[in-house]
Image (cartoon, rainbow, N blue to C red):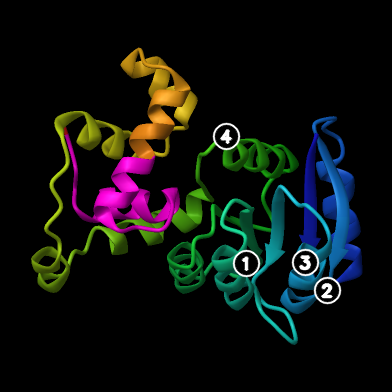
């Protein structure tokens, strides 16, 4: 069972999210917080698998909280929620290591599926958000191109491309006829070579560098 922390300053919204998520027997909302600072305090005391967090909150917002959490608890998955269809929030959240970005208006099944996706190594972007974010990610600057001098093997490039397509370790393993453990080892090597922090940054890297077959 996955332990989820809900971070949202509106109590009614938190209660609604909890009811939706706990429809699935694999998900249990074990803790709640009203801002990013409270979420960090909870992480110091309790083990959390996934955080579903609002982007606009008092005291500490979701973007700043994501930055701190990913620096100190890199394995905790973070899904950013907002009512604002603004690509700026999505870009900032992904830059700080968020594992997905959803609108609060998403269907209940989408919210549940997003938890499954991030827990299995995937990334979730609401369709409306992706439509704005992806084109911006594809706008590669000359400075970025000039600063990257990464030598990846053919297999590493293939795995990087699949990660950029949003596929999970299991899906990549099935496609390449390798074990999940082998894929994880490759992922570790790729992150070391590229100097990137996590899978989310690697996915963005793959899109920006237009890594294709």
Magenta stretch: residue 177 in it? Answer: no
Q: How far apart are marks 4 and 1 (CA)?
A: 19 Å
The correct choice, above or below, for 138 with respect to 173 in the image is below
- Quadrant in the picture for residue 101: bottom right
**Front in this rendered view, residue 21 or 107:** 21
Q: How far apart are marks 2 and 1 (CA)?
A: 16 Å
**Which residue sits at x=31%, y=51%?**
192
Identify the disc placed on residue 120.
4
Residue identified by numbered label 2: 34
Identify the disc placed on residue 44.
3
Q: Distance between the residues labelled 3 and 4?
A: 24 Å
Q: Nearer the viewer, mark 3 or mark 4?
A: 3
**Which residue sits at x=39%, y=24%?**
182
**Front in this rendered view, residue 3 or 189:** 189
The reply to whether callout 2 and callout 3 are in contact (CB within 8 Å) is no
Magenta stretch: residue 208 in it? Answer: yes
- Quadrant in the picture for residue 22: top right
Density class for disc 4 (Cα within 10 Å; few <14, some 14-19, many ≥20) is some
Mark 4 or mark 2, which is nearer the start of the sequence?
2
Residue identified by numbered label 1: 69
Q: Distance between the residues labelled 2 and 3?
A: 16 Å
Residue 13 visible in this rendered orientation of the protein: no
Q: Give the range drawn in magenta.
A: 188-212
């Amino acid at each position: 069972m996955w332990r989820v922390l809900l971070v949202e300053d509106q109590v009614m919204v938190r209660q609604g999210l909890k009811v939706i998520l706990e429809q699935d027997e694999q998900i249990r909302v074990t803790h709640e917080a009203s801002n990013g600072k409270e979420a960090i305090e909870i992480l110091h005391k309790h083990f959390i698998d996934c955080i579903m967090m609002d982007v606009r909150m008092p005291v500490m917002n979701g973007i700043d909280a994501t930055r701190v959490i990913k620096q100190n608890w890199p394995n905790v998955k973070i899904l950013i929620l907002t009512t604002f269809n603004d690509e700026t929030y999505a870009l900032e959240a992904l830059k700080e290591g968020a594992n997905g970005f959803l609108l609060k208006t998403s269907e209940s099944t989408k919210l549940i599926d997003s938890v499954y996706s991030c827990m299995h190594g995937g990334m979730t972007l609401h369709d409306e958000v992706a439509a704005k974010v992806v084109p911006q990610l594809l706008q590669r600057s000359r400075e970025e191109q000039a600063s990257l001098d990464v030598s990846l093997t053919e297999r590493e490039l293939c795995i990087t491309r699949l990660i950029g397509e949003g596929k999970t370790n299991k899906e990549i393993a099935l496609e390449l006829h390798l074990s999940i453990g082998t894929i994880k080892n490759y992922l570790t090597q790729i992150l070391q070579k590229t100097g990137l922090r996590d899978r989310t940054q690697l996915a963005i890297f793959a899109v920006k560098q237009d890594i294709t077959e």
